[in-house]
Each structure stands twice: as structure tokens, then as C-alpha cells.
Amino acid sequence: EKGGYEHFMLKEIFEQPRAIGDCMRGRLSANEGRLVLGGIREYANKLVNAERIIIVACGTSWHSGLVAEYFFEEFCRIPVEVEYASEFRYRNPVINEGDVVFAISQSGETADTLAAIELAKSKGAIIFGVCNVVGSSISRISHEGAYTHAGPEIGVASTKAFTAQLTVLNMIALRVAHQKGTITERRYHELLVELENIPAKVEKALKLDDQIKAISERFQNARNFIYLGRGYNFPVALEGALKLKEISYIHAEGYPAAEMKHGPIALIDEEMPVVFIATRDSSYDKVVSNIQEVKARKGKVIAVVTEGDALIPQMAEFVIEVPKTDEALMPMVSVIPLQLLSYHIAVMRGCNVDQPRNLAKSVTVE
Ligand code: F6R
């Protein structure tokens, strides 16, 4: 059932090219410029005309929500608020009739997310569900939505569900932007083509496995880790840190790289591994300066960069090269080495990666 892999988590990491492909199948054809989401029909215009979007989720799904915020704002010019379901539901949030709420959940059973959308629905909001488990509670209570079709995710640490969520949310944002006319035809088509290329790029990123295993060996006894990124890679930094702490029990923090100087920089010494997600994008030069700040304090830099980067390899101890893609789609590729890094470190430390202590696959208690 693990298909020859030692753990479900590793199997699911390696399934991502297929999972992302399945998620796009029948929905996207770059050739024909077609993007059809069967589950978003009746309420599609509500979404197109939304004055704001609220996204509610927990954990890794909340990180997908953060990336989706950037999609909807950049492509659709709709303001987005991304909320922890548990905070949103208890603070008497402002929800108006016709507001659009997205609930993102792999299991579709997370108690806080479910309660948050029940609350929003009772106030007249339109709920779109992005779930993996077909027929789950969240998918049933939502007005409309789109499944991620990643297949069953057994490992407690979410991997393929995350990249499939990003795929769906990206397709939804592009579909809305195209109808609204907030994206140029050219960029729309470029992104459709790039989306179709993502499974092959993820496949290529998975070939880094041996290199990442070697890096994992070097850092398996670290007591702390910091993950830094900016823009689309900021939520990837949060996700990398979450993956590491939940399965290896190493304390890790994810931060937007520029926030480092407002506190966490005090943690940096020659013992501190700092993972930078530093791919070539609009914040590249800024991230390079942040790497210099860490180097000046003797931190050990592990950098995820775009293939062919000539500058960062002169600065970082370890460099992981991922294929180039559009910056909006990079999280689907740049997260792969971070998933593998946490997996290998956890295995080396003798941890039960598929069932980490104190965690359950679906959190049906609040
Ligand atoms: C992290 C992880 C959790 C879940 C969270 C939400 O690897 O698995 O943080 O992402 O419990 O679960 P879903 O997506 O099922 O609502």
C-alpha cells in the first residue's frame, strides 16, 4: 500500500506530479485557453463581483490560503483576508450578506474550519469549499467549490494536499481574473502554459532527493531552524518550518525575510541553520541582502534557488536548485525540497514520520 516507499509521507511527496496533474485534468487546457471548474457555476458571478474574499483554514491549509491571497489580489484585484478558523469564529467577525468565504481543508472535517463557515453561512455569506476528501462535511456544507483530487493522504503531515490546493486556488483565481478582465490575455495564457508544466518541474525537483538527504545528515542534530522567504515564498517558509517541527520535533520558525531584523535576527549564531527560499523573482535582490545579514552573523545558510543562479552559491553553505517557473507558481516547486528535508531529518532522528506524537490526521475537536 506504500507502493515500495518506506513511509506514506515519502510516497505522497513523490506522488505530487501525478496529484497536481489529476487536479488539472479536465479543467485546464492551455492549448485551447480553457479553464473550466465544474463545481463553480451558479455562484461564479458572486465570486467575480466580490468586494472582498475571506479565506478560513488551519495549519498547512492556512498556508495555502496565504498563497491564494497573493493570487486573488494580484490577478483579480480583490482584497483578501486569510484567517485562522479558530480565531475568526470566536471574535464576532464582520460578515455581510453576499460576502465570499473560501474554506480550505484537506480532510473537510476540521472542527474549527467547519464551525467558521457555519457561522459565515448563517450571516448570508457564500461559501466555496476547497477540500480533498469527497463528500466530507465541509464540502457538503459549502455552496460550491472544487475538489483537489490529490487522492487519499495518509501521512499526518500534509504534502500533496498542499500543492493540489495551490493548483486549484490558482485555477480559480485565473478563471475569475479572466472573466473580470484584471489579467492581460498574454499573462493568462502564459500562466496556463506554466501550470501545465508544473508536474514536470515538480518531478525534476524530486530528483534532488539524494542531495537533500546529504544536507539532512549535516543538520539532523540541530536544535533550531529558521525559514525565510518573501512574497510568494513567504508562506512556503512558514510551511517548511511547520513540516520540520511536526515530524522531527526540531523547533523551527518561519518568517518573512524582512521581518528578521525586527527580532529573530537575535537568534542567529554559528549554530543556526537558516533556510532561505530565494528563487529568482521580484524580491530576489532583497532576499540576497537578507542572506548577507545572516552570513554576517555566521548563520549556516541553506538556500533554495532557481537553476543557474550564480550569486547565491557564493554566499550559502548549501544550495538547492529548483526549476524556473512563474513566481506565482513557484511555491508548488520550492516547497518540494523543504518537504524532503523535513522527511529525511525526521527519519534520521528516528521519528515516526507518518504518525507524529500528539497529532491526528483530522482535527475534529476544537
Ligand atoms: C500539517 C497538517 C495540519 C493540517 C491542519 C488542517 O502538516 O497536516 O496542519 O493542515 O490540521 O487540516 P485540514 O486541511 O484537513 O483542514
Image (cartoon, rainbow, N blue to C red):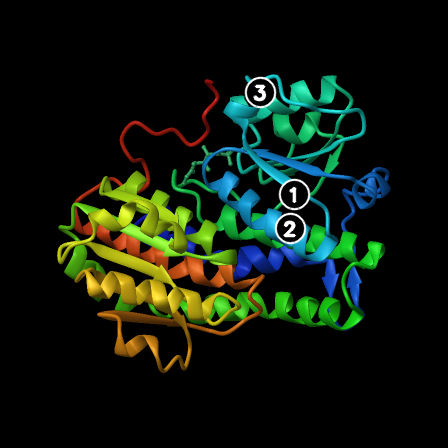
Amino acid type of disc 3? Arg
Residue 106 coordinates in the image, percent (x, y): 53, 38
Relative height, residue 83 to residue 6 (above, below): above
Residue 92 coordinates in the image, percent (x, y): 61, 17
Q: Real-space Cα distance between discs 3 and 2?
A: 25 Å
What residue lies at 33% left-to-right and 40% top-to-bottom?
Answer: 354
Amino acid type of disc 1? Tyr
Relative height, residue 337 to residue 42 (above, below): below
Query: Is the residue under label 2 in contact with that under label 1 (CB below 8 Å)?
Result: yes
Q: Which mark is residue 183?
A: none
Q: Quadrant of residue 4?
A: bottom left
Q: Mark 3 highlights which residue?
A: 89
Q: Mark 1 highlights which residue?
A: 147
What residue lies at 28% left-to-right and 46% top-to-bottom?
Answer: 264
Q: Is residue 63 left or right of residue 89?
A: left
- Element type at mark 3: loop
Q: Nearer the viewer, mark 1 or mark 3?
A: 3
Q: Is residue 217 visible?
A: yes
